[in-house]
Amino acid sequence: MKFRGFSILLLVLILPFFAPSAYADPTILGTAAAFAVLAGTTVTNTGSSVIYGDLGVSPGLAITGFPLVHGTKHAGDATALQAQKDLVTAFDTLVGKTVTKNLTGKDLGGLTLTPGVYKFDSEAQLTGTLTLDAQGKSNALWVFQIHSTLTTASNSDVDIINNNPGSNDGLFWQVGSSATLGTTTDFLGNIVALTSITLNTGATDNCGRVLARNAAVSLDGNTISNGSNGTNGSAGCLNVGEGGSSGLSGGGGTPPPTPEPGTLMLIGCGIFGLLVFRRLT
């Protein structure tokens, strides 16, 4: 009985070292997380747009209109190419998430949604205010799976309530074709679109990214921040680039260390030796 109790105690102590770490996976966006704006063919700008984070295009080369960029421009280079590859992976990952609720045919305006995965079998429309309630929980995650287009009406906005500043939360808009933000829309989250993304005059995404896989990103006097200007994790803002729960992990502070395979082997051998010694004595 003493041996059995001793063995169980050792197993309880050692198993956590072999359990997969919640921090082992990279952020869902991979290297694309460094970008506030990423396009496939071209980035065009009209007016005084301001971008906090990197600006890139690949496989295209054109960046026109010279928006103010607090970051690095990557026009068809290896960094932009890798970001686009990671964007494809992120898009497919978001498509594969298990759906919490189907909202097909409903306008997002006026809704209050708790963390979950929300699906639209066709287009999604936002007219007015969408409220996302984190319910005071850390690692809150919202994913919107939109089969075709995402469109917001003028003056629409996305509000976050009851979130914990600094929490490892996530907000992703997976768009099956193109996204268009109406004039002066106050948006939040990572837009990951298959085709193009257009921000009309004065639209903002002060806590997220606009990432288009195959076509253009068009700007017109907009502000976009991936959090590199200090908003990330501040009051009223999400760590929208770092994922959250439900497998979209990474980066909410310093992750706990994951033991190397050699370390695990040594630990296992040591435990086995202790067990043998215990049985012999």
Image (cartoon, grey):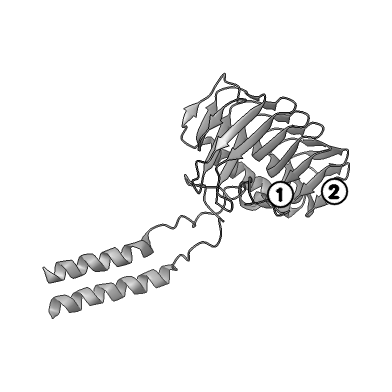
Residue 176 visible in the picture: no
Q: Amino acid at mark 1?
A: Phe
Residue identifier under label 1: 35
Q: Residue at x 11, y 68 (%)?
A: 1
How crowded is the residue under tag 1: few (<14 C-alpha within 10 Å), some, or many (20+)? many
Which residue, as the protein is rendered here, is positioned at the far left?
A: 1
Q: Residue at x 76, y 50 (%)?
A: 52
Mark 2 or mark 1, earlier in chain: 1
Q: Is residue 32 above or below residue 122?
A: below
Q: Secondary structure at mark 2?
A: strand
Q: Position of residue 217 (x, y in %)?
A: 77, 37
Q: Position of residue 50 (x, y in %)?
A: 81, 45
Q: Is residue 183 above or below residue 141?
A: above
Residue identifier under label 2: 68
Q: In this orientation, which residue lies closer to the viewer: 51 or 215?
A: 51
How crowded is the residue under tag 2: few (<14 C-alpha within 10 Å), some, or many (20+)? few
- In which quadrant will I find the C terminus? bottom left
Q: Is residue 123 left or right of residue 65?
A: left
Residue 226 visible in the picture: yes
Q: Position of residue 30 (x, y in %)?
A: 61, 51
Q: Residue at x 42, y 67 (%)?
A: 261
